Amino acid sequence: MSAALVKPVLYSYFRSSCSWRVRIALALKGITYDQMPVNLLKDGGQQFSTEFQAVNPMQQVPALKIDGIMLSQSLAIIQYLEETRPNPRLLPQDLKNRAQARMISDHIVSGIQPLQNLTLLKQVGEEKKLEWAQHCITRGFQALEQILQHTAGRYCIGDEPEQKVHETSGGHLIPELNIPVLQLLHPTVGGKVNLGV
C-alpha cells in the first residue's frame, strides 16, 4: 500500500498545546488520522519510554507519522501539511503576511510555551512553578499584544480566516492579563484572561 494512502497517526497528549496546534491543523485540512495517546504524567511520563523514544528521540509530543515519514515539532508538522495539502490554506498567500503569521507562531512556540513546559517546571520546583510560568506567559503575551496592534484586523493578521491564530495560550498557568487585541480576536476571552490555577 502506498504511504500516501495509509492513515496518519498522531502521537499526542490531550493537554499539550503543541498537540492542539496539530489537531487543529489536521481538522482544518479535513485530514482523518488515528491517535496514539502519550500520557505526559502517567508512570513518570510515557514520553520517556523506550518505545516512544523510537518515535521521537526528543521524547516530546506531538509526533505525526504521515506519508511514510515521522515528523515532530508542531510547526514543522503544520508546515509539512500546508506544503503537501495546500487547500484549505492555513497561512496567508501574501508573503509579508505569511512571514508575520510565522513570526507570531514562533513567538508562541519558542518564546512563551516552552518556558512553562512540564520538564522545565520540574526544574523550577513545586513552590516556584506557578510564579515562573505566569511570569513567562505574561511577558510573552505583552510582547504578542504589541505585535498584534500592528498586524491584527479581524484576525491576528488582517481579515482573512486562514490568517487566524487558532490558539492563543494552551490554557494552563496563565495569570490574569488585560490583553485588548486578543480580547477582540478571541471572544471567549471576555474582559480579562484568568486561567490561573
Image (spheres, rainbow, N blue to C red):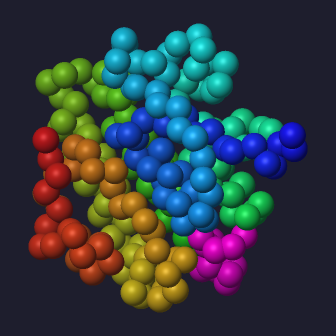
Q: Position of residue 24 (x, y in %)?
A: 49, 58
Q: Quadrant of residue 87?
A: bottom right
Q: Is residue 93 magenta?
A: yes
- The residue that appears at 67% across and 19% down in the rendered structure is 54
78 w.r.t. 36: above or below? below
109 w.r.t. 38: above or below? below
Task: Single out the residue that lies furthest toward the front.
Answer: 1
What is the magenta segment's predominant secondary structure? loop
Q: Quadrant of residue 145?
A: bottom left
Q: Position of residue 92 (x, y in %)?
A: 62, 79
| Image quadrant where one finds the N terminus | top right
Q: Is residue 13 left or right of residue 169?
A: right
Q: Nearer the viewer, residue 134 or 153?
A: 153
Q: Is residue 91 left or right of residue 45?
A: right
Q: Is residue 60 left or right of residue 31?
A: left
Residue 54 visible in the snapshot: yes
179 w.r.t. 24: above or below? below
Magenta residues, start to end? 86-99
Q: How many marks?
A: 0
- The residue that appears at 44% across and 55% down in the rendered structure is 108
| Image quadrant where one finds the C terminus | top left
Residue 178 visible in the snapshot: no
Q: Position of residue 7 (x, y in %)?
A: 69, 45
81 w.r.t. 59: above or below? below
- The residue that appears at 52% across and 13% down in the rendered structure is 49
- The residue that appears at 83% across and 43% down in the rendered structure is 3
Q: Position of residue 112 (x, y in %)?
A: 39, 49
Q: Is residue 56 left or right of residue 181?
A: right
Q: Is residue 159 magenta?
A: no
Q: Nearer the viewer, residue 18 or 192?
A: 18
